[in-house]
Amino acid sequence: MHTVEKIGGTSMSRFEELMDTILVGKRTVPEELYNRIFVVSAYGGITNYLLEHKKTGEPGVYARFANAESEQAWIDELNKVQARMEEINAELFGEAEFERNAADSFVIERLNDVRDCMKSLHHLCTYGHFQLEEHLMKVREMLASIGEAHSAYNSVLALRKAGINARFVDLTGWHMDQPLPFEEMIKQQFEDVDIASEMLIATGYTHCEEGLMKTFDRGYSEMTFSMIATVTGANEAIIHKEYHLSSADPMLVGTDNVVTIGATNYDVADQLSNLGMEAIHPKAAKGLRRNGVKLRIKNAFEPEHEGTIISQEYHSDAPRVEIIAGRKDVFGIEIFDQEMLGDAAYDIEISKLLAQLKLYVINKDADANSITYYVGGSRKMVNRAARLMEDMYPEGQIRLHNLAIVSAIGSHMKVKGILARTVSALAEAGINVMALHQSIRQVEMQCVVSDEDYEQAVIALHAALIEPRNPSVTSAA
Ligand SMILES: Nc1ncnc2c1ncn2[C@@H]1O[C@H](COP(=O)(O)OP(=O)(O)O)[C@@H](O)[C@H]1O
Ligand SMILES: N[C@@H](CC(=O)OP(=O)(O)O)C(=O)O
Protein backbone atom coordinates (compact mmCIF):
# COMPACT_ATOMS: atom_id res chain seq x y z
CA MET A 1 0.00 0.00 0.00
CA HIS A 2 1.71 3.20 -1.10
CA THR A 3 0.84 6.76 -2.09
CA VAL A 4 2.05 8.87 -4.99
CA GLU A 5 2.46 12.53 -4.01
CA LYS A 6 3.11 15.51 -6.24
CA ILE A 7 4.78 18.67 -4.99
CA GLY A 8 4.14 21.80 -7.09
CA GLY A 9 6.78 24.37 -7.95
CA THR A 10 5.59 27.05 -5.54
CA SER A 11 5.89 24.61 -2.64
CA MET A 12 9.24 23.23 -3.83
CA SER A 13 10.63 26.75 -3.46
CA ARG A 14 10.03 26.35 0.31
CA PHE A 15 11.96 23.07 0.47
CA GLU A 16 13.35 23.38 3.98
CA GLU A 17 9.83 23.63 5.37
CA LEU A 18 8.84 20.58 3.33
CA MET A 19 11.52 18.58 5.13
CA ASP A 20 9.71 19.34 8.38
CA THR A 21 6.24 18.66 7.07
CA ILE A 22 5.55 16.15 4.33
CA LEU A 23 8.98 14.72 3.60
CA VAL A 24 10.34 13.83 7.02
CA GLY A 25 8.79 15.73 9.95
CA LYS A 26 8.33 13.45 12.95
CA ARG A 27 8.53 10.24 10.93
CA THR A 28 11.25 7.96 12.23
CA VAL A 29 10.33 4.41 11.25
CA PRO A 30 10.47 3.01 7.71
CA GLU A 31 6.71 2.33 7.64
CA GLU A 32 6.08 6.05 8.03
CA LEU A 33 8.96 7.33 5.94
CA TYR A 34 8.68 5.07 2.95
CA ASN A 35 5.91 3.61 0.81
CA ARG A 36 5.64 7.07 -0.71
CA ILE A 37 6.67 8.12 -4.20
CA PHE A 38 7.17 11.87 -4.61
CA VAL A 39 6.88 13.55 -7.99
CA VAL A 40 8.40 17.00 -8.03
CA SER A 41 7.99 20.07 -10.21
CA ALA A 42 10.73 22.53 -11.02
CA TYR A 43 11.20 25.28 -8.40
CA GLY A 44 8.74 28.15 -8.89
CA GLY A 45 9.56 30.31 -11.92
CA ILE A 46 12.27 28.03 -13.38
CA THR A 47 10.15 26.57 -16.20
CA ASN A 48 9.05 30.10 -17.05
CA TYR A 49 12.70 31.04 -17.56
CA LEU A 50 13.48 27.87 -19.48
CA LEU A 51 10.49 28.17 -21.84
CA GLU A 52 8.28 31.24 -21.50
CA HIS A 53 6.17 32.74 -18.73
CA LYS A 54 3.12 30.53 -18.31
CA LYS A 55 0.65 33.39 -17.95
CA THR A 56 2.17 36.47 -19.58
CA GLY A 57 4.03 34.65 -22.37
CA GLU A 58 7.24 36.62 -21.63
CA PRO A 59 9.98 34.78 -23.57
CA GLY A 60 12.49 32.53 -21.85
CA VAL A 61 15.30 30.49 -23.45
CA TYR A 62 13.02 28.40 -25.65
CA ALA A 63 10.89 31.28 -26.93
CA ARG A 64 14.00 33.30 -27.81
CA PHE A 65 15.47 30.34 -29.67
CA ALA A 66 12.22 29.54 -31.49
CA ASN A 67 11.64 33.18 -32.49
CA ALA A 68 15.06 33.07 -34.14
CA GLU A 69 16.34 35.94 -32.02
CA SER A 70 20.15 36.32 -32.10
CA GLU A 71 22.17 33.44 -30.69
CA GLN A 72 23.34 35.76 -27.93
CA ALA A 73 19.74 36.43 -26.82
CA TRP A 74 18.94 32.82 -25.92
CA ILE A 75 22.45 32.11 -24.59
CA ASP A 76 22.13 35.10 -22.23
CA GLU A 77 18.79 33.76 -21.08
CA LEU A 78 20.28 30.30 -20.51
CA ASN A 79 23.08 31.85 -18.45
CA LYS A 80 20.43 33.58 -16.34
CA VAL A 81 18.78 30.21 -15.70
CA GLN A 82 22.13 28.77 -14.64
CA ALA A 83 22.74 31.69 -12.27
CA ARG A 84 19.26 31.27 -10.76
CA MET A 85 19.75 27.52 -10.32
CA GLU A 86 23.09 28.06 -8.61
CA GLU A 87 21.47 30.64 -6.36
CA ILE A 88 18.81 28.08 -5.37
CA ASN A 89 21.54 25.50 -4.68
CA ALA A 90 23.35 28.01 -2.47
CA GLU A 91 20.16 28.85 -0.56
CA LEU A 92 19.46 25.17 -0.05
CA PHE A 93 22.90 23.84 0.81
CA GLY A 94 24.78 26.92 2.01
CA GLU A 95 27.94 25.68 3.71
CA ALA A 96 27.32 22.00 2.91
CA GLU A 97 30.08 21.84 0.35
CA PHE A 98 29.60 18.28 -0.88
CA GLU A 99 25.90 18.76 -1.66
CA ARG A 100 26.33 22.21 -3.09
CA ASN A 101 29.11 21.11 -5.47
CA ALA A 102 27.16 18.03 -6.52
CA ALA A 103 24.05 20.14 -7.16
CA ASP A 104 25.97 22.74 -9.18
CA SER A 105 27.85 20.14 -11.25
CA PHE A 106 24.62 18.33 -12.03
CA VAL A 107 22.80 21.33 -13.49
CA ILE A 108 25.87 22.76 -15.19
CA GLU A 109 26.39 19.47 -17.02
CA ARG A 110 22.78 19.39 -18.22
CA LEU A 111 22.78 23.04 -19.22
CA ASN A 112 26.05 22.59 -21.12
CA ASP A 113 24.58 19.59 -22.95
CA VAL A 114 21.51 21.51 -24.01
CA ARG A 115 23.56 24.58 -24.98
CA ASP A 116 25.76 22.40 -27.24
CA CYS A 117 22.73 20.72 -28.79
CA MET A 118 21.03 24.02 -29.52
CA LYS A 119 24.16 25.53 -31.03
CA SER A 120 24.72 22.48 -33.26
CA LEU A 121 21.08 22.52 -34.29
CA HIS A 122 21.30 26.18 -35.12
CA HIS A 123 24.34 25.50 -37.26
CA LEU A 124 22.73 22.50 -38.94
CA CYS A 125 19.70 24.54 -39.83
CA THR A 126 21.74 27.03 -41.80
CA TYR A 127 21.61 24.26 -44.46
CA GLY A 128 18.32 24.30 -46.34
CA HIS A 129 17.78 20.56 -45.90
CA PHE A 130 17.22 21.02 -42.18
CA GLN A 131 14.34 23.10 -40.90
CA LEU A 132 14.46 24.46 -37.38
CA GLU A 133 10.67 24.11 -36.94
CA GLU A 134 10.95 20.34 -37.27
CA HIS A 135 13.18 20.13 -34.21
CA LEU A 136 11.74 22.80 -31.97
CA MET A 137 9.58 20.44 -29.92
CA LYS A 138 12.63 18.35 -29.00
CA VAL A 139 14.43 21.47 -27.82
CA ARG A 140 11.40 22.48 -25.76
CA GLU A 141 11.23 19.04 -24.15
CA MET A 142 14.95 18.98 -23.41
CA LEU A 143 14.93 22.42 -21.83
CA ALA A 144 11.82 21.76 -19.74
CA SER A 145 13.21 18.51 -18.35
CA ILE A 146 16.19 20.29 -16.74
CA GLY A 147 13.87 22.14 -14.35
CA GLU A 148 12.49 18.94 -12.83
CA ALA A 149 15.84 17.12 -12.94
CA HIS A 150 17.32 19.97 -10.89
CA SER A 151 14.66 19.93 -8.17
CA ALA A 152 14.48 16.13 -7.92
CA TYR A 153 18.24 15.69 -7.77
CA ASN A 154 18.57 18.37 -5.09
CA SER A 155 15.79 16.80 -3.04
CA VAL A 156 17.61 13.48 -3.00
CA LEU A 157 20.85 15.18 -1.92
CA ALA A 158 19.06 16.95 0.94
CA LEU A 159 17.18 13.83 2.05
CA ARG A 160 20.29 11.66 2.02
CA LYS A 161 22.11 14.29 4.04
CA ALA A 162 19.32 13.92 6.59
CA GLY A 163 19.85 10.17 6.68
CA ILE A 164 16.89 9.18 4.52
CA ASN A 165 17.28 6.40 2.01
CA ALA A 166 16.20 8.49 -0.97
CA ARG A 167 16.55 7.52 -4.61
CA PHE A 168 16.51 9.79 -7.67
CA VAL A 169 14.18 8.45 -10.34
CA ASP A 170 15.33 10.30 -13.43
CA LEU A 171 12.53 10.09 -15.99
CA THR A 172 14.09 12.70 -18.28
CA GLY A 173 15.71 10.05 -20.50
CA TRP A 174 18.81 12.23 -20.69
CA HIS A 175 21.16 9.48 -21.85
CA MET A 176 18.62 7.09 -23.35
CA ASP A 177 19.07 5.85 -26.93
CA GLN A 178 15.41 5.64 -27.81
CA PRO A 179 12.31 7.09 -26.21
CA LEU A 180 9.72 4.60 -24.95
CA PRO A 181 5.95 5.06 -24.93
CA PHE A 182 4.86 7.05 -21.83
CA GLU A 183 3.33 4.17 -19.90
CA GLU A 184 6.17 1.81 -20.79
CA MET A 185 8.77 4.34 -19.64
CA ILE A 186 7.13 4.64 -16.22
CA LYS A 187 6.70 0.88 -15.91
CA GLN A 188 10.34 0.26 -16.72
CA GLN A 189 11.70 2.93 -14.38
CA PHE A 190 9.68 1.64 -11.44
CA GLU A 191 10.33 -2.05 -12.06
CA ASP A 192 13.30 -2.54 -9.75
CA VAL A 193 12.54 -0.12 -6.95
CA ASP A 194 11.81 -1.06 -3.39
CA ILE A 195 9.02 1.23 -2.29
CA ALA A 196 9.05 -0.11 1.27
CA SER A 197 12.67 0.81 2.00
CA GLU A 198 13.36 3.74 -0.33
CA MET A 199 11.87 7.18 -0.68
CA LEU A 200 11.54 7.67 -4.41
CA ILE A 201 11.85 11.16 -5.82
CA ALA A 202 10.79 11.23 -9.46
CA THR A 203 11.15 14.08 -11.94
CA GLY A 204 7.79 15.61 -12.87
CA TYR A 205 8.98 15.53 -16.47
CA THR A 206 8.98 12.21 -18.36
CA HIS A 207 10.77 11.74 -21.66
CA CYS A 208 8.57 9.62 -23.89
CA GLU A 209 7.74 8.76 -27.48
CA GLU A 210 4.55 10.83 -27.46
CA GLY A 211 6.32 13.95 -26.14
CA LEU A 212 4.95 15.09 -22.80
CA MET A 213 5.05 18.79 -23.71
CA LYS A 214 3.57 18.16 -27.14
CA THR A 215 0.62 16.22 -25.76
CA PHE A 216 -0.06 17.99 -22.48
CA ASP A 217 2.06 21.16 -22.42
CA ARG A 218 2.54 23.16 -19.21
CA GLY A 219 1.48 21.59 -15.95
CA TYR A 220 2.85 18.31 -17.36
CA SER A 221 4.21 17.11 -14.03
CA GLU A 222 0.67 16.14 -13.08
CA MET A 223 0.62 13.81 -16.09
CA THR A 224 3.72 12.05 -14.78
CA PHE A 225 2.15 11.97 -11.33
CA SER A 226 -1.10 10.46 -12.58
CA MET A 227 0.68 7.86 -14.73
CA ILE A 228 2.93 6.78 -11.84
CA ALA A 229 -0.10 6.49 -9.56
CA THR A 230 -1.99 4.30 -12.01
CA VAL A 231 0.95 2.18 -13.19
CA THR A 232 2.20 1.44 -9.66
CA GLY A 233 -1.35 0.90 -8.34
CA ALA A 234 -1.22 3.60 -5.67
CA ASN A 235 -3.65 3.55 -2.81
CA GLU A 236 -4.08 7.30 -3.02
CA ALA A 237 -2.77 10.15 -5.20
CA ILE A 238 -2.01 13.38 -3.35
CA ILE A 239 -1.20 16.83 -4.74
CA HIS A 240 0.59 19.10 -2.28
CA LYS A 241 0.04 22.80 -2.81
CA GLU A 242 1.07 26.01 -1.14
CA TYR A 243 -2.37 26.57 0.38
CA HIS A 244 -5.45 24.49 0.96
CA LEU A 245 -7.70 24.55 -2.03
CA SER A 246 -9.70 27.56 -0.93
CA SER A 247 -12.82 29.49 -1.77
CA ALA A 248 -10.56 32.12 -3.43
CA ASP A 249 -6.88 32.93 -3.73
CA PRO A 250 -5.79 33.38 -0.07
CA MET A 251 -3.09 35.83 -1.18
CA LEU A 252 -5.79 38.09 -2.59
CA VAL A 253 -8.70 37.71 -0.21
CA GLY A 254 -6.73 36.98 2.96
CA THR A 255 -6.12 33.61 4.62
CA ASP A 256 -8.63 34.45 7.38
CA ASN A 257 -11.44 35.17 4.98
CA VAL A 258 -11.24 32.12 2.74
CA VAL A 259 -12.89 28.79 3.42
CA THR A 260 -11.07 25.53 2.77
CA ILE A 261 -12.87 23.37 0.24
CA GLY A 262 -13.40 19.98 1.87
CA ALA A 263 -14.55 18.19 -1.23
CA THR A 264 -15.20 18.97 -4.85
CA ASN A 265 -15.64 17.26 -8.19
CA TYR A 266 -13.66 16.98 -11.40
CA ASP A 267 -16.06 19.29 -13.21
CA VAL A 268 -15.18 22.17 -10.87
CA ALA A 269 -11.48 21.28 -11.20
CA ASP A 270 -11.77 21.60 -15.00
CA GLN A 271 -13.27 25.11 -14.71
CA LEU A 272 -10.40 26.14 -12.40
CA SER A 273 -7.79 24.81 -14.73
CA ASN A 274 -9.39 26.62 -17.70
CA LEU A 275 -8.69 29.83 -15.80
CA GLY A 276 -5.08 28.83 -15.17
CA MET A 277 -5.57 27.86 -11.51
CA GLU A 278 -4.80 24.22 -11.78
CA ALA A 279 -6.41 22.16 -9.07
CA ILE A 280 -5.45 19.26 -11.28
CA HIS A 281 -4.49 19.06 -14.97
CA PRO A 282 -7.74 17.93 -16.68
CA LYS A 283 -5.97 15.19 -18.59
CA ALA A 284 -4.26 13.89 -15.46
CA ALA A 285 -7.61 13.72 -13.73
CA LYS A 286 -8.89 11.42 -16.48
CA GLY A 287 -6.33 8.68 -15.77
CA LEU A 288 -6.99 8.71 -12.04
CA ARG A 289 -10.74 8.76 -12.53
CA ARG A 290 -10.67 5.79 -14.90
CA ASN A 291 -8.48 3.74 -12.62
CA GLY A 292 -10.43 4.57 -9.51
CA VAL A 293 -7.44 6.10 -7.69
CA LYS A 294 -8.57 8.45 -4.93
CA LEU A 295 -7.29 12.02 -5.37
CA ARG A 296 -6.60 14.42 -2.55
CA ILE A 297 -5.29 18.00 -2.63
CA LYS A 298 -3.39 19.03 0.49
CA ASN A 299 -1.59 22.01 1.91
CA ALA A 300 2.08 21.01 1.92
CA PHE A 301 2.68 23.05 5.08
CA GLU A 302 -0.23 21.75 7.14
CA PRO A 303 0.22 17.99 6.85
CA GLU A 304 -2.26 17.13 9.61
CA HIS A 305 -5.16 18.66 7.69
CA GLU A 306 -7.12 16.19 5.56
CA GLY A 307 -7.27 18.47 2.53
CA THR A 308 -9.73 18.30 -0.35
CA ILE A 309 -11.03 15.06 -1.81
CA ILE A 310 -11.81 15.25 -5.50
CA SER A 311 -14.33 12.75 -6.75
CA GLN A 312 -16.62 12.26 -9.68
CA GLU A 313 -19.85 12.23 -7.68
CA TYR A 314 -19.51 15.18 -5.28
CA HIS A 315 -22.20 17.87 -5.35
CA SER A 316 -22.71 20.41 -2.55
CA ASP A 317 -25.81 19.61 -0.46
CA ALA A 318 -27.31 23.05 -0.85
CA PRO A 319 -26.98 25.13 -4.02
CA ARG A 320 -24.19 27.67 -3.64
CA VAL A 321 -21.11 29.33 -5.09
CA GLU A 322 -18.06 27.46 -3.79
CA ILE A 323 -15.06 29.18 -5.38
CA ILE A 324 -14.26 32.60 -6.78
CA ALA A 325 -11.43 32.19 -9.27
CA GLY A 326 -10.19 34.32 -12.08
CA ARG A 327 -7.51 35.39 -14.40
CA LYS A 328 -5.77 38.67 -15.12
CA ASP A 329 -3.98 39.63 -18.33
CA VAL A 330 -6.72 38.37 -20.59
CA PHE A 331 -7.00 39.92 -24.05
CA GLY A 332 -10.36 40.39 -25.67
CA ILE A 333 -9.95 40.18 -29.44
CA GLU A 334 -13.14 41.57 -30.94
CA ILE A 335 -13.97 41.32 -34.61
CA PHE A 336 -16.98 43.21 -35.97
CA ASP A 337 -17.97 42.54 -39.57
CA GLN A 338 -21.44 42.90 -41.03
CA GLU A 339 -20.58 40.25 -43.64
CA MET A 340 -20.34 37.74 -40.79
CA LEU A 341 -24.09 37.38 -40.31
CA GLY A 342 -24.99 33.70 -40.72
CA ASP A 343 -21.49 32.64 -41.80
CA ALA A 344 -19.97 30.04 -39.45
CA ALA A 345 -16.68 29.98 -41.37
CA TYR A 346 -15.45 33.11 -39.56
CA ASP A 347 -15.38 31.40 -36.20
CA ILE A 348 -13.77 28.25 -37.59
CA GLU A 349 -11.00 30.13 -39.38
CA ILE A 350 -10.21 32.47 -36.49
CA SER A 351 -10.20 29.63 -33.95
CA LYS A 352 -7.71 27.78 -36.16
CA LEU A 353 -5.52 30.85 -36.39
CA LEU A 354 -5.50 31.38 -32.60
CA ALA A 355 -4.59 27.72 -32.06
CA GLN A 356 -1.72 27.99 -34.55
CA LEU A 357 -0.39 31.01 -32.66
CA LYS A 358 -0.68 29.00 -29.43
CA LEU A 359 -3.08 31.51 -27.89
CA TYR A 360 -5.28 29.89 -25.30
CA VAL A 361 -8.97 30.69 -25.75
CA ILE A 362 -10.55 30.87 -22.30
CA ASN A 363 -13.97 31.76 -23.65
CA LYS A 364 -15.68 33.50 -26.54
CA ASP A 365 -18.97 35.20 -27.21
CA ALA A 366 -20.83 36.32 -30.27
CA ASP A 367 -23.75 38.38 -31.50
CA ALA A 368 -25.18 38.81 -35.00
CA ASN A 369 -22.12 40.47 -36.51
CA SER A 370 -19.27 40.26 -34.02
CA ILE A 371 -17.26 37.66 -32.13
CA THR A 372 -14.96 38.29 -29.17
CA TYR A 373 -12.30 35.78 -28.17
CA TYR A 374 -11.00 35.98 -24.60
CA VAL A 375 -7.45 34.72 -24.82
CA GLY A 376 -4.38 34.26 -22.66
CA GLY A 377 -0.88 34.60 -24.10
CA SER A 378 1.76 37.17 -24.93
CA ARG A 379 0.83 40.62 -26.19
CA LYS A 380 3.15 40.07 -29.13
CA MET A 381 1.18 37.01 -30.26
CA VAL A 382 -2.13 38.76 -29.68
CA ASN A 383 -0.97 41.68 -31.84
CA ARG A 384 0.12 39.21 -34.50
CA ALA A 385 -3.29 37.52 -34.37
CA ALA A 386 -5.00 40.90 -34.79
CA ARG A 387 -2.83 41.76 -37.80
CA LEU A 388 -3.49 38.40 -39.46
CA MET A 389 -7.22 38.80 -38.82
CA GLU A 390 -7.10 42.21 -40.50
CA ASP A 391 -5.48 40.59 -43.55
CA MET A 392 -8.07 37.81 -43.59
CA TYR A 393 -11.05 40.13 -43.21
CA PRO A 394 -10.22 43.54 -44.73
CA GLU A 395 -13.81 44.72 -44.17
CA GLY A 396 -13.77 43.73 -40.50
CA GLN A 397 -12.96 46.02 -37.58
CA ILE A 398 -10.67 44.48 -34.98
CA ARG A 399 -10.33 45.85 -31.46
CA LEU A 400 -8.19 44.65 -28.56
CA HIS A 401 -9.23 45.00 -24.91
CA ASN A 402 -7.16 44.48 -21.74
CA LEU A 403 -9.39 42.43 -19.53
CA ALA A 404 -9.72 40.10 -16.59
CA ILE A 405 -12.16 37.29 -15.99
CA VAL A 406 -13.67 36.71 -12.57
CA SER A 407 -15.62 33.56 -12.11
CA ALA A 408 -18.02 32.17 -9.50
CA ILE A 409 -17.88 28.36 -9.56
CA GLY A 410 -19.89 25.65 -7.82
CA SER A 411 -20.85 22.02 -8.17
CA HIS A 412 -24.52 22.83 -7.57
CA MET A 413 -25.60 26.34 -8.57
CA LYS A 414 -28.92 25.82 -10.29
CA VAL A 415 -30.86 28.27 -8.22
CA LYS A 416 -32.90 31.32 -9.14
CA GLY A 417 -31.31 34.73 -8.64
CA ILE A 418 -27.70 33.60 -8.18
CA LEU A 419 -26.60 35.35 -11.38
CA ALA A 420 -28.37 38.54 -10.36
CA ARG A 421 -26.64 38.50 -6.94
CA THR A 422 -23.27 38.01 -8.61
CA VAL A 423 -23.68 40.93 -10.97
CA SER A 424 -25.13 43.25 -8.34
CA ALA A 425 -22.18 42.52 -6.01
CA LEU A 426 -19.91 43.87 -8.72
CA ALA A 427 -22.17 46.85 -9.43
CA GLU A 428 -22.23 47.73 -5.72
CA ALA A 429 -18.43 47.70 -5.69
CA GLY A 430 -18.51 50.17 -8.58
CA ILE A 431 -17.17 47.65 -11.09
CA ASN A 432 -18.36 47.69 -14.68
CA VAL A 433 -19.23 44.23 -16.06
CA MET A 434 -18.16 44.27 -19.69
CA ALA A 435 -19.47 40.82 -20.64
CA LEU A 436 -21.09 37.94 -18.84
CA HIS A 437 -21.05 34.21 -19.54
CA GLN A 438 -23.07 31.44 -18.07
CA SER A 439 -23.62 28.18 -19.84
CA ILE A 440 -26.76 26.14 -19.46
CA ARG A 441 -24.97 23.62 -17.20
CA GLN A 442 -24.56 26.40 -14.65
CA VAL A 443 -21.29 25.30 -13.12
CA GLU A 444 -19.77 28.74 -13.45
CA MET A 445 -20.61 32.38 -14.07
CA GLN A 446 -17.85 34.36 -15.70
CA CYS A 447 -17.80 38.14 -15.46
CA VAL A 448 -15.48 40.01 -17.79
CA VAL A 449 -14.12 43.19 -16.23
CA SER A 450 -11.38 45.66 -16.98
CA ASP A 451 -7.90 44.38 -16.09
CA GLU A 452 -7.50 47.04 -13.36
CA ASP A 453 -10.65 45.88 -11.60
CA TYR A 454 -9.51 42.26 -11.16
CA GLU A 455 -8.48 42.24 -7.49
CA GLN A 456 -11.46 44.33 -6.36
CA ALA A 457 -13.85 42.12 -8.31
CA VAL A 458 -12.55 38.92 -6.65
CA ILE A 459 -12.75 40.52 -3.21
CA ALA A 460 -16.27 41.85 -3.85
CA LEU A 461 -17.63 38.53 -5.14
CA HIS A 462 -16.05 36.58 -2.32
CA ALA A 463 -17.45 39.01 0.25
CA ALA A 464 -20.95 38.83 -1.22
CA LEU A 465 -21.27 35.17 -2.17
CA ILE A 466 -19.02 33.20 0.20
CA GLU A 467 -18.07 35.12 3.35
CA PRO A 468 -21.62 35.36 4.75
CA ARG A 469 -21.52 31.55 5.02
CA ASN A 470 -18.08 31.43 6.63
CA PRO A 471 -18.53 31.18 10.41
CA SER A 472 -15.03 32.40 11.23
CA VAL A 473 -15.58 35.57 9.21
CA THR A 474 -19.07 36.15 10.58
CA SER A 475 -17.96 35.77 14.20
CA ALA A 476 -14.97 38.02 13.65
CA ALA A 477 -17.21 40.74 12.24
N1 LIG B 1 -8.63 28.92 -4.80
C1 LIG B 1 -7.34 28.88 -4.47
N2 LIG B 1 -6.92 28.09 -3.48
C2 LIG B 1 -5.62 28.02 -3.16
N3 LIG B 1 -4.64 28.72 -3.80
C3 LIG B 1 -4.99 29.53 -4.80
C4 LIG B 1 -6.35 29.65 -5.18
N4 LIG B 1 -6.40 30.50 -6.22
C5 LIG B 1 -5.18 30.90 -6.48
N5 LIG B 1 -4.28 30.35 -5.62
C6 LIG B 1 -2.85 30.65 -5.66
O1 LIG B 1 -2.17 29.59 -6.33
C7 LIG B 1 -0.81 29.77 -6.02
C8 LIG B 1 -0.01 28.59 -6.54
O2 LIG B 1 -0.32 27.48 -5.84
P1 LIG B 1 0.13 26.04 -6.21
O3 LIG B 1 -1.00 25.39 -6.92
O4 LIG B 1 0.68 25.42 -4.99
O5 LIG B 1 1.29 26.23 -7.27
P2 LIG B 1 2.01 25.12 -8.13
O6 LIG B 1 1.36 25.10 -9.49
O7 LIG B 1 3.39 25.61 -8.17
O8 LIG B 1 1.80 23.84 -7.45
C9 LIG B 1 -0.83 30.01 -4.53
O9 LIG B 1 0.27 30.78 -4.14
C10 LIG B 1 -2.14 30.79 -4.32
O10 LIG B 1 -1.90 32.17 -4.09
N1 LIG C 1 7.23 23.09 -14.05
C1 LIG C 1 6.31 22.76 -15.10
C2 LIG C 1 5.51 21.55 -14.76
C3 LIG C 1 4.50 21.70 -13.68
O1 LIG C 1 3.57 20.95 -13.66
O2 LIG C 1 4.65 22.68 -12.76
P1 LIG C 1 3.66 23.01 -11.46
O3 LIG C 1 3.44 21.72 -10.77
O4 LIG C 1 4.44 23.99 -10.65
O5 LIG C 1 2.38 23.57 -12.05
C4 LIG C 1 5.44 23.93 -15.57
O6 LIG C 1 5.55 25.01 -15.07
O7 LIG C 1 4.68 23.75 -16.49
Image (cartoon, helix red, strand yellow):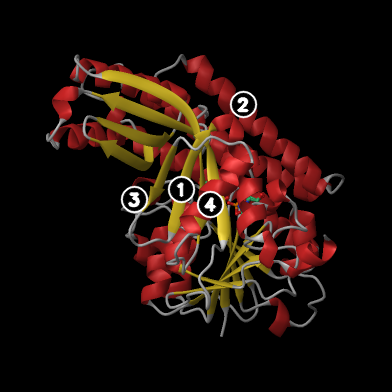
Query: Of the residues under marks 4 and 2, which one precedes in the sequence?
Result: 2
Instruction: Identify which residue is drawn at 31% across, 53% down.
Output: 210
Q: Is 50 located above or below residue 231 in the figure? A: above
Mark 3 or 4: the one toward you = 4
Image quadrant holding the N terminus, namely bottom right
How many angstroms separate mark 3 from mark 4 (CA)?
37 Å
How many angstroms separate mark 4 from mark 2 (CA)?
48 Å
Residue named by callout 2: 79
- Label 3 near label 1: C-beta < 8 Å? no
Instruction: Identify which residue is drawn at 35% across, 49% down.
Output: 211
How many angstroms separate mark 4 from mark 1 (CA)?
10 Å
The mark tally for this picture is 4
Question: Dot 1: what SS?
Answer: strand
Q: Nearer the viewer, residue 237 or 206?
A: 237
Neighbor class of circle 4 (other Cα within 10 Å; few <14, some 14-19, many 20+) is many
Q: Nearer the viewer, residue 252 or 279?
A: 252
What's the amino acid at mark 1? Answer: Gln
Q: Residue 287 carries which label?
A: none
Q: In the shown orientation, is residue 427 left or right of residue 208?
A: right
What's the amino acid at mark 2? Answer: Asn
Image quadrant holding the C terminus, namely bottom right
The quadrant in which residue 79 appears is top right
Residue named by callout 1: 446
Residue named by callout 3: 215
Question: Dot 4: what SS?
Answer: helix
How many angstroms separate mark 3 from mark 2 (CA)?
28 Å
Query: Of the residues under marks 3 and 4, which one precedes in the sequence?
Result: 3
Mark 4 or 1: the one toward you = 4
Percent position of residue 48, x then y: 55, 37
Mark 3 or 2: the one toward you = 3
Residue named by callout 4: 422
Percent position of residue 67, x then y: 40, 21
